[in-house]
Structures are given as C-alpha cells and as structure tokens.
Amino acid sequence: GAGVSQSPSNKVTEKGKDVELRCDPISGHTALYWYRQSLGQGLEFLIYFQGNSAPDKSGLPSDRFSAERTGGSVSTLTIQRTQQEDSAVYLCASSPRMTGRETQYFGPGTRLLVL
Amino acid sequence: DAKTTQPTSMDCAEGRAANLPCNHSTISGNEYVYWYRQIHSQGPQYIIHGLKNNETNEMASLIITEDRKSSTLILPHATLRDTAVYYCIVPVVSTSYGKLTFGQGTILTVHP
C-alpha cells in the first residue's frame, strides 16, 4: 500500500517568507509526528497528533512554527517569517496508534532551504 | 526514552554478517527495543523490534540478552545498500505519547 508522502520534496524560500509543508499519512493511521533534521544532526521531535489533536506543542522551536491536522488525515506544518536556521529536512511519520509500541513509518521528507 | 549507547561507527565487508550492538541498561520491563536505519538522504526506516525474545524478519535478526540490558542487530549478509546510520531506540511506553528519541546511532559502512 501507499506509504507516507510529503510535499513538496524540496523548497527554497527567502528569509522572512512563510512556508507550508504537507504530510499525507498512511490511511487509517491515527498518530502523526513531525520531526526535523538539520544538516549533520540527529532527528529533533517537533509535534505529534493523535487524531486531530496535538496535546503537546512544546517541541516546536518557536511561535513561528504551527501545525494542524484535519479529518484525522493530512497535516500541515507552517513556518512563518522563515529564518536561515530553519533550513533542514522536515520529516513526517505516522503510526496506527500512539503507545510507544507502535512502529512509526516515515515519509521521504521535505528539504527546506532558507536563503 | 531509556538511554541507549551505540558505537559511533562500524565497518563490514559485503556478504558478511554485520553485528551492531546497543546498550540499554536502564530499560524497564515493559519497554521494547526498536531499530531503525536512515540511508543517506532518506527518511528513517523501521527494521525490527523486540521485548525479550529474539526476533527475526526479512531484514534482520534481533538478539536481546536475558537481562535485557543490551541487544545486537544482525544483518546476516550485508550489502552495499545496507550502508546507513542505524538507531537503537527504547521508546517510552505511554497511552498518550509515542515520540521517538533518535541518538547519534551507528554509522555502518559496508565495503566491497
């Protein structure tokens, strides 16, 4: 079946512009996660959704970052007034539930470059 | 997540078995051990997981010690395409929180 998809695959933007990153999870997966990976660094957890609810937003780096999920499916990560330090690969993952015992399936990521 | 310790890097000859160790001495009785890998420029990929029994699937085998304080991921016949960063993760068991904490992992290089 179809895996997690993300769009766009690459995004180049100018400092100060807003960007939207999209994630389509595996059909039927209720849990959705966003991670960020800066060049040469490990994965940094950003936010998770159980259904359409995001109980913990403390992983978001700043208030310029926001995320939403509608219909228990597609999620959008929005970065307002982008800065150069926002340049990274943004990864989305989904799992059937959220218990810490569920395998997470990752998408290919969106490579964001802020000039 | 319970802390895990992995070697920074390992080498393996193509066709040979790759044995990747992981220490997780603070693991709790109901916490699983998960292994993921990340091939260059791709998202992480699930490999295998286990609780206390040894596990095997089409990708790898997982050997967990009896005291569960360490484990070894075995790629029985490594290929060049297995060159990747391998992460050993012990997620927090929770009904409300399932994030993965990725450490630095082990860089496995498979050479001809």
Image (cartoon, grey):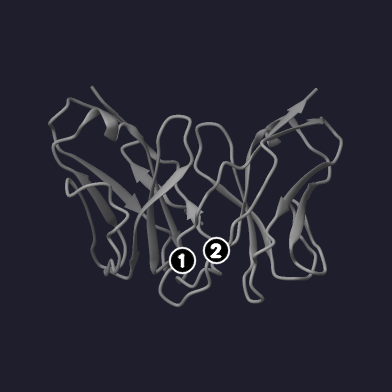
- Judge left or right: residue A40 versus residue B9: left
Q: Residue, x 61% and y 42% (percent of image)?
A: B105
Percent across and percent down for residue B71 are: 76, 57
- Judge left or right: residue B26 versus residue A52: right
Q: Amino acid at mark 1?
A: Gly
Q: Amino acid at mark 2?
A: Pro
Q: Name the one closer to the observer, A25 or B52.
A: B52
Percent across and percent down for residue A19 are: 19, 39
Q: Which residue corresponds to mark 1?
A: B98
Q: Name the one closer to the observer, B83 or A24.
A: B83
Q: Which residue corresponds to mark 2?
A: B91
Whether the residues at callouts 1 and 2 have beta carbons within 8 Å, the answer is: yes
Q: Earlier in the sequence, mark 1 or mark 2?
A: 2
Percent across and percent down for residue A64 are: 17, 45
Q: Quadrant of residue A38?
A: top left
Q: Residues within 10 Å of mark 2 (few under 14, many from 20)?
A: many
Q: Are callouts 1 and 2 both on one chain?
A: yes
User: Alpha carbon of mark 1 to alpha carbon of mark 2: how far?
Assistant: 7 Å
Residue A111 in view here: no
Percent across and percent down for residue B53 are: 79, 70
Q: Name the one closer to the observer, A5 or A20.
A: A20
Q: Which chain contains the residue that carries disc 1?
A: B
Q: Residues within 10 Å of mark 1 (few under 14, many from 20)?
A: many
Residue A33 in view here: yes
Q: Residue, x 53% and y 62% (percent of image)?
A: B1
Residue A69 lies, with reference to residue B52, above or below; the image says above
- Judge left or right: residue A98 versus residue A13: right
Which disc number belongs to residue A69?
none
